[in-house]
Amino acid sequence: MGKNKLSKRKVLHGVYSFKMGGAEKIVSYYARYHDRSRFEPIICSLTSGGELEEEIKKFNVKTFMFNKQKIFPLLFLIKLIKFIKREKIDIIHSHNFVVNNWFIVAALLSGVKNRIRTDHTVQNQFYKKGLLFSVISNILGLLNKKIISVCERVRVSNQKKGIFGRGRYITIYNGIDPDLYLAKEINKGRFYKEFFIEEGSKIVGNVGNLTLQKGQRYFIEAAKILSDQYKDVAFLIVGNGPLRNELENLAKKLEIKEKVIFSGVRTDIPELLQFMDIFVLSSLREGFSIAILEAMAAKKSCVVTDAGGNSEVVEDGVTGFIVPPNDPIQLADKILTLLKDDNLRNSFGEKGRKRVLENYTAERMVKETERIYEL
């Protein structure tokens, strides 16, 4: 599969599924921004379909889905190897540990030498799969030419745990398309009516899957504190997940059910960000949050927890506030500061967008990755 540097090369991006999450959204940017004069991207899902597949097809990129969970492991591996050989893949780029464990073996047995892994999160959450999984992941990491981390905190954490191949770790920050998140005009009145919020109320928003790691519980507890101190405010939680019923019951128990709105999954995130006055990320654990980048691109002031790479993108006291995880009191205090100060809120928003434009665009991310492919 050796090609000279001037030839167009096929890049196979491997993701766990085509359901839209942080890592999957990043892969959609690779589909959009790869230099087609030099690279031909193909996106492959190990398991299931989802909305990401349709998004990728908009950019005239081939997709493939394996349904691994329905195939005996050895047969799946054989099928993956045949696919790589049939498509004449030159570069394997797998996203996260589980995907890499399969793709790296298939790449090795297919003769693909240019093998890249991106770590979108820290290894800690995968220890629940057992020590054997962690050891295997570290050994297989040795077979990658480079291991890309989406922020410094992920790189430092995973490099310490990666006994093998430490010199292979590099950092390439996630990026987005900032122009998608600065809507020219929106009808805020429509959202006030849809969510039964009193018109003119300040909107404090959160976007993310409703899971333990996203910490929406602490956002709701902060909302209770704020509701006693600032009357004209509502709290919008965008997303869905296994904890939705539990979180709705918490809002009811705290007697702020009317103040906390659960929108479910939405496709109009840019417009909803424009509807918000303040963006909050209350995560207990993160990689490098795409939601923060989107909020900053929309000129929203941010209050975020010191988890993962959050403190690498948000400059405390400049583009937002950083608070400890699991601390609804400090979370509420910083939100209240912004609710009371329009000038500070606007200043954070302007500086936040400028920071995204200068450091966190998808085009920059893809170009840096393509340079790694060519080493």
Image (cartoon, rainbow, N blue to C red):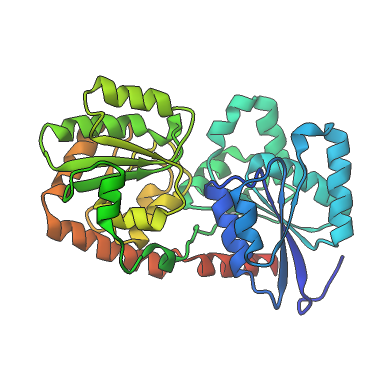
Residue displayed at 26% across by 65% down? 350
User: Closer to the camera, 234 or 217?
Assistant: 234
Residue displayed at 42% across by 68% down? 179
User: Closer to the camera, 160 or 257?
Assistant: 257
Outermost residue toward the top in this view: 253
Whether 369 is drawn above or below 304: the answer is below
User: For residue 8, which quarter of the picture?
Assistant: bottom right
Please identify the quadrant where the C terminus is shown: bottom right
Residue 34 in view (yes/no): yes
Residue displayed at 50% across by 46% down? 154
Residue 168 in view (yes/no): no
Give residue 190's position: percent from left, percent from top: 29, 53
User: For residue 322, which quarter of the picture?
Assistant: top left
Please identify the quadrant where the N terminus is shown: bottom right
User: Closer to the camera, 339 or 275?
Assistant: 275
Give residue 251's position: percent from left, percent from top: 28, 26
